[in-house]
Image (cartoon, rainbow, N blue to C red):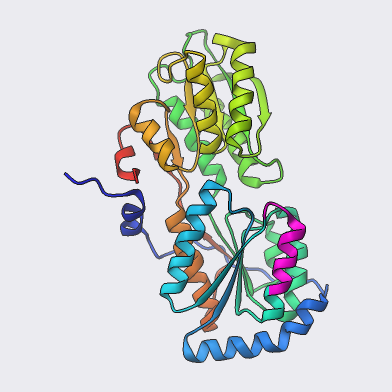
Amino acid sequence: MKMISRRDFLKASAVVGATAAMTACGGSSSTSTAASSAAASSAAASSAAATNGSANIGVCIYQFADNFMTLYRSDLEEYLKDMGYSVTIMDGKNDQNTQTEQINTFLQQGVDVLVINPVQTTSAQTIVDTVKPSETPIVFINREPDKSVLDSYADKCCYVGADARQSGTYQGELILETETQGDINGDGKITYIMCKGDPENIDAQYRTEYSIKALTDAGKEVECLYEYLDNWDQTTAQQDVANALSQYGDKIEVVFCNNDAMALGALQSIQQANRTVGKDIYLVGVDALAEAVQDVLDGNMTGTVLNDDVGQATKAAEATKLYVEGSKVEQYYWVDYVKVTKDNASEYVK
């Protein structure tokens, strides 16, 4: 039997509908010189786009080097171009000042819609205040701004993403579904280390919190040996997990990682320390990157959680299209995560 690729499988399974929360009114009167100068041309361009079906879309990605966002932006570009839109994608290089300059450039060019994956969610309100005078719609993706930010630009701003609390919960459930329920040494307590992403990123915060909450909600006693700030980075996680294994040894029963890149780094150190996933240690990540899914299939990772780049890119493109057409856009569009285990990993192999 021919194995279907992860992307083809997800595209075939993508659901167009969205679970939405209705928007509330609110306001901010901040202005931007760049946005003000672009307002007239942007409005004219939007009107023309609505008439002839074409549009210019500006996409800001926080960092091209991010493995998951590489998949996401590739999908998004494909879908937007299939809709007949002109698409320009900029690399924020993980620097908010750089991304802000890129947003101002897009405003000066009079793009019809901005799709923004913010470098810092704490800067989302400043982004809205900059864009608002031009009346250019914003589709925030992947990194969720506070609801008050969306409220401040009602009917012109939405968020497309996945609820990171669900991904954290699924990580905890993956551990609970193992033979020992995470308690390898049988002492009645699950001891773990945590490799965390960007501390300002709500996804990192929720995955850290809710992975452990799933254990305690199930009545398990837990002990955190150490939390490492690895900022999504594979090499940093590899070094920190190597240090942890040297310091804590067999006390470490579970390694939680906020994303798969860090999990892949952790796996390198686990194997170098002659530990065996599934036998004397457990390892979970998030994203379902190709290499991680293969490791799950091969038994080298306990599991991962699919962060559906195809589903999110599909909904982001659809929200963009609604803005171009002047149709009603909801404030939130959510895409579910999926637990990936050895039993179903073959469905997500690229």
Which residues make up the magenta segment? 93-105
Q: Residue at x 57, y 55 (%)?
A: 142
Left or right: residue 132 versus residue 285 is: right
Residue placed at 26% from the left, 49% from the top?
A: 4
Q: Which one is nearer the viewer's eye here, 208 or 3?
A: 3
Say if residue 269 shows up in the picture. Answer: yes
Vertically, is 206 above or below 44? above
Q: Is residue 51 left or right of residue 153?
A: left
Task: Please name whichever residue, 170 or 240, is drawn nearer the observer in this view of the structure.
Answer: 240
Indicate whether residue 115 is drawn in magenta. no
Kindly give the residue lying farthest to the left in the view shown.
1
Q: Where is residue 123 drawn, in percent x and y? A: 75, 58
Q: How many marks?
A: 0
Residue 219 visible to the viewer: no
Residue 170: x and y in percent read: 47, 37
96 inside magenta stretch: yes
Residue drawn at (47%, 22%) of the image: 282
Which quadrant, please, contains the N terminus? top left
The residue nearer to you, when weighing 329 against 83, is 83
User: In the picture, residue 34 is in which quadrant?
Assistant: bottom right
